[in-house]
Amino acid sequence: MRIDLQGSGGFANLKLAYHADTDTLPPAQAEELLKLVESSRVFDLQQSDLTPALHGVRPMYFLISFRYLKGTDKDL
Amino acid sequence: MKQNKKKQTALYPCHCTFVPPYVLDRLSKASEATVSQETREAARASLTQDNQIRANRASQAANTPKPGDVIEGVMAPPKGTAGREVYSCASQWGEPPPYALMRGEGDPLTADDAVNAAYNHGGAVRDYYKNKLGRNSIDNLGMNQIHNIHFGVQYVNAFWDGTKMTYGDGDGAIFTNFTKDLDVVAHELTHGVTQHTCNLIYKDQSGALNEHFSDVFGTVIEQAIDGKTAHDADWLIGDGVMGPVLTGEALRSMRAPGAAYDNPIIGKDLQPDHISRYYFTPWDNGGVHINSGIPNKVFYLVAMDIGTDKAALIWYDTLQKLPPDAIFQTFAVYLTDSARLLTNNGQVPIGTTQTVRIALKEVGLFPIV
């Protein structure tokens, strides 16, 4: 799985990015990361669940992209 | 004393619960790629004596409350009394069991500096709004302030999420604890004030105005507490949370948008100081933290002429009248009208309306309906 995560916002408004490909991580790390992704149930989420309300501040937002070589891709 | 568990669960609709903690941990350390471990350690050691740091940490680690802990003698104030409630997230991300209340309104000092800082700064913000602007807390109805500190692990940010404040501890090298700086607390609480007044849409120009008002009252309140005038204030936002690696930098400059920072770690300040240099970006909800530089410069110029507190009166009046979808041009019209109104009732000096027009023109805005 390829994970691309970018976020910004909040007081500091730092634009932070994290990229990982579980195929290239050490096995233990890859397994941990996949477990975390699975436990987050991110694939059950719909974009509408995450769309920030434009009234009022939302602290930070993330653009997350999950890509499998085969199977389901998910962009949020 | 047990807190209202049901309400606390509803209060924490975390936008990030689907983000794995491991990923967030890596995010918080993203800057390690550009800052050597030696530099970071040297920076941390230079901040204070190493032995004292270790002793404090050992003590705090032993005494750090966990989610769900109830601390003897600490009580939350009644709702609607503008009381302060400071909770420790105990380095948790996402939605946990209720956080431990560390200090409620009227409770004594604690051993945790971050708790005391959030408490004190929250009080300064509350008291300024009440005593100078006649406002009874965030919603003008005595809404209690909720401060959640020690959020996550080395979290390099702070935010208002619609009901409460949340602060990270920083990484100790690039950013320090975000409760440390009064203008952080004042900035974020002012988002609450905006939410309960004109409720500016947090996107594009209205979002930049939302950010702008928070920077305005962040700096206004900091100047008031520090006893500074417009002429001897630094007009910097976030300079107090810069860690040893970025000492001397700031996140924003109201005096000189675009000059707050320039370094390989966090990049270059992109704020424009003129509408002709408006920054178009899909990031940051359309650049709300970036384009706030344009109205920020207006406030600076007006404050330098009539004084910060007098300028704050105009801005507060405007804040209560703007439509949620106001653009900069709308802001210019309303601001000029507020200046004229307050001049008419003697709250600001004669000539202020003209001062506001000149300041707006300086950044390329004209209050034409």
Image: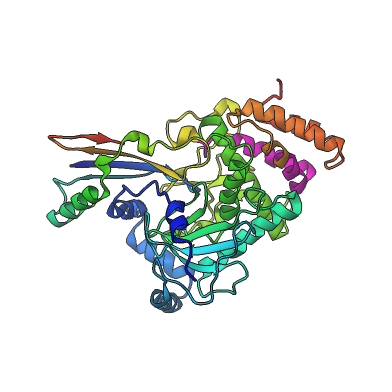
Q: For residue B82, say whether it is visible.
A: yes
Asked if residue B212 is positioned above or below residue B142 in the image, the reply reads: above
Choose between A55 and B46: the one closer to the eye: A55
Q: Position of residue B205 (x, y in %)?
A: 56, 30
Q: Main secondary structure of the magenta part?
A: helix
Residue at the image point whose x is 50% and y is 37% from the top: B270
Q: Position of residue B102 (x, y in %)?
A: 50, 69
Q: For residue B237, say whether it is visible.
A: no
Which quarter of the picture shows residue B350? top right
Q: Position of residue B196 (x, y in %)?
A: 61, 43
Choose between B144 and B226: the one closer to the eye: B144
Asked if residue B89 is positioned above or below residue A33 in the image, the reply reads: below
Which quarter of the picture shows residue B6? bottom left
Question: Does residue B270 appear left or right of residue B355 in this picture?
Answer: left
Q: Specify start and end residues of the magenta stretch as a single range.
A: B288-315
User: Residue A46 magenta-drawn?
Assistant: no
Asked if residue A16 is positioned above or below residue B224 in the image, the reply reads: above
Q: Position of residue B52 (x, y in %)?
A: 45, 78
User: Residue B309 magenta-drawn?
Assistant: yes
Asked if residue B5 is positioned above or below residue B335 in the image, the reply reads: below
Question: Does residue B161 appear left or right of residue B67 in this picture?
Answer: right
